[in-house]
Image: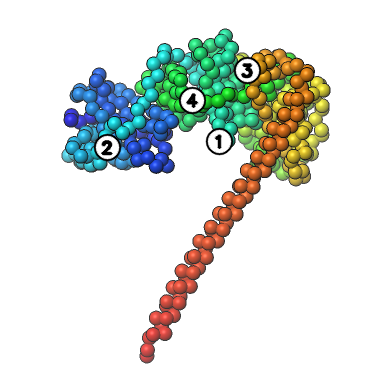
Amino acid sequence: MKPITLPVAELKPALTGLGKVLNGRSTLAILNNIKVERTNDGWIALTSTDLDRWATVRLEHPAEGPPATVLLPFDQLSQLVKSCGKGESIEVMSSGDHNLIRFPLGDTLGESKVPFVSPDEFPATPRIKCEAIPLSSTLRESILEAMECASEDSTRYVLNGTFIDARDRKANYVVATDGKHLYSANSFTLPLKESVIIPTHKFLDWKEFASDGEWQMREGEKHLQLSSRRWRFITKTIEGNYPDWRAPVPNPADAKTVVTLDPAKLKTLIKLIQRMPCHDERYHTLGLEWKGGQFMLMGKDKPQEDWLRVPVPDIQGRGPDVTVFLDRQYLIKGFGYGLNTISLISAVHPIRLHSGGKQLIIMPVRANDTEPAPSPAKPAPPPAVTTAASSTQPPPKAEQPTPTTPMQTHPPTNGKTHHGANGSSNGSDKSDTKSTLEAALLQLEGIKSGFRESINQLSKIGDSIRAAMREQKASEKEIHGVRQTLRSLQSVRI
């Protein structure tokens, strides 16, 4: 066959992207290869897969020659490319019972042989034939932001991705949550027949793919394709019913205190928050205080110290005095998304950061040394907060903040909407049943948290035992060496 020429300047970044899809722990040898092909039109394309995802890149310029396909080990090809200069090229071809990789070696060409693997063994790439849907830069940005807020808990797989809610044909939503904070963005209208959950994957956040021109999306029965100018990424979608994400979202009309920050000062504010003292490495507790028309950040270096209050200038606010505590990492994330308005109901209600059609809902934490938060205005607690969890958790250590109830999401209830972002509410006859179910869910979350902490402790104990065993083996070797030396000395005669 005529060799396929691969310019190193294009091949290096291509291998970086293809490597993000490969599973280094795969037991199937074929998945450690990439497919290099020259199409009927002369274009050169490279593909990698882990059976759940496929990444394909098309090189910039076509090449002469008949169609051809070669499978090459990814690791071996990567090592050869690392030693080549940007202006050089390598050639790949199939030759009998082996494949060849030719690379520059001084004034001549070096040659590396790899075992021949039939291209037919490479998993077929799914073909999605529906119309491509252009994705605006705003929508693409929202999808990537949502992925940063998705859960990483494998036991809650349905939350391990970005949910595109297409139930409202006139206003789609991009949603993600991990139970502690929730992201949503609206004002999108896509010609989707059904809602879809896009699994989170590091390839989608790769800067080369994000900057490779406009994205287009194709939705298949079980797969979804996102493509740019030169790249194509196909992934299996997450099957299952996404929980009713509107349930924990507070009604905007219930907000009593609203603080608006200067959008131009958000980056400076992020740096200020990062420098604020933090006495709690688990929840990264930070206080927000609105008092006497002044907005302040609260932090302390040690639990027994008083709160340090730092005023935030250039703000506009209204409403009664209120103090809330939250994980500063979520606040930094929201400011990074450009969300410059903070809406507060009380110390125990979720905090809402929003701007335009985007919002980030953050569950508060509470510190033991603070005064009890005022009771909610409504007799029933909001969907995201309940006091039932206090009976399932052991009492916290003095002065340590404890998280409030994790954000709970519930499946839709026969078309009846929950008290959420659209301002609607459930019927009062369902509140008692809902509170009982929430209490059961909270108890379950508490038990799961306890098991996780126990497993972490057991892992630490196992690491300590293994370290002790290594030290014991080293000591035994030293003792054995000393004994051998003594025996040799005893055999010496003067």
Q: Nearer the viewer, mark 3 or mark 1?
A: 1
Looking at the picture, tell me which residue is in the foreground, 481 or 378.
378
On the rendered image, what quadrant is the C terminus found in? bottom left
Distance from Cα at disc 3 to Cα at disc 1: 31 Å
Is 249 on the left or on the right of 494, as rendered?
Answer: right
Colouring chosen for the image of the structure: rainbow
The residue to which callout 1 is attached is 154
- For label 2, the crowd category at 10 Å Cα-Cα, with few meaning under 14, some 14 to 19 and many 20 or more, is some
Q: Check disc 2 and give the amino acid type.
A: Val
Q: Regarding mark 1 in the picture, which secondary structure is present there? A: helix
Identify the residue at horizontal 31%, vertical 33% (top origin): 121
Q: Check disc 1 and give the amino acid type.
A: Ser
Distance from Cα at disc 4 to Cα at disc 2: 30 Å
Q: Which of marks 3 and 2 is in front?
A: 2
Distance from Cα at disc 1 to Cα at disc 4: 15 Å
Identify the residue at horizontal 49%, vertical 69% (top origin): 476
Tell me which numbered mark, 3 or 1, is placed earlier along the sequence.
1
